[in-house]
Amino acid sequence: MTDNGGSSAGSATVKIEIYDQSYNVNADGNEEYLKELAAYVDGKMRSIAESTRMVDSLKVAVLAALNIADETFTLRQRQQEIDGPLRKRVEKCVAMVEKALEHTN
């Protein structure tokens, strides 16, 4: 996904708007997903601007980026907390299946 104004083979340039600024971005085949991302970022920026009464768009963008980064890190941590125990259970199940298969031969 680039904001170069041009289009490469297999990707369409899509015009999106975030916080009253327009961008031409290569969609790489998924325009709806890109539009959804843009709407999410726009919503975060508007929410932060409203709650902080901040007008500087660069500062609003940085705070929105921090907010989105926090969401991402929180989700990663939750995923890791799930993956560890789940992986152990899967390994235990595989070992049980392998043991059962050994007994049938």
Image (cartoon, rainbow, N blue to C red):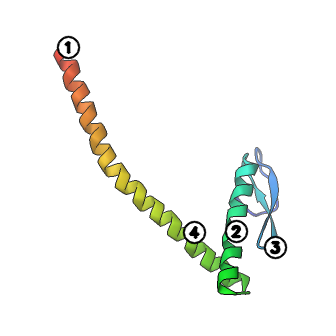
Q: Which residue is mark 3?
A: 20
Q: Earlier in the sequence, mark 4 or mark 1?
A: 4
2 vs 4, front mark: 2
Q: Earlier in the sequence, mark 2 or mark 3?
A: 3
Which residue does the image show at 31% across and 51% down from the upper left?
Answer: 84
Mark 4 secondary-structure assignment? helix
For the residues bearing labels 2 and 1, Cβ distance under 8 angstroms: no
Mark 3 secondary-structure assignment? loop
Q: Which residue is mark 2?
A: 43
Per the rendering, the mark at residue 104 is 1
Mark 3 closeness class: few <14, some 14–19, many ≥20 residues within 10 Å:
few
For the residues bearing labels 3 and 4, Cβ distance under 8 angstroms: no
Q: Earlier in the sequence, mark 1 or mark 3?
A: 3
Mark 4 closeness class: few <14, some 14–19, many ≥20 residues within 10 Å:
some
Give the spatial CA distance, label 4 vs label 1: 52 Å
Q: Quadrant of the C terminus?
A: top left
Mark 2 closeness class: few <14, some 14–19, many ≥20 residues within 10 Å:
some
Determine which quarter of the picture holds residue 44. Answer: bottom right
Q: Quadrant of the N terminus?
A: bottom right
Mark 1 closeness class: few <14, some 14–19, many ≥20 residues within 10 Å:
few
For the residues bearing labels 1 and 3, Cβ distance under 8 angstroms: no
Q: Foreground: 60 or 49?
A: 49
**63 displayed left or right of 13:** left
Q: Amino acid at mark 4?
A: Ile
Q: Residue furthest front?
A: 51
2 vs 1, front mark: 2
Give the spatial CA distance, label 2 vs label 4: 11 Å
Q: Which residue is mark 4?
A: 68
Which residue does the image show at 28% across and 41% down from the upper left?
Answer: 89
- Residue 28 point in image, percent of width and height: 72, 49
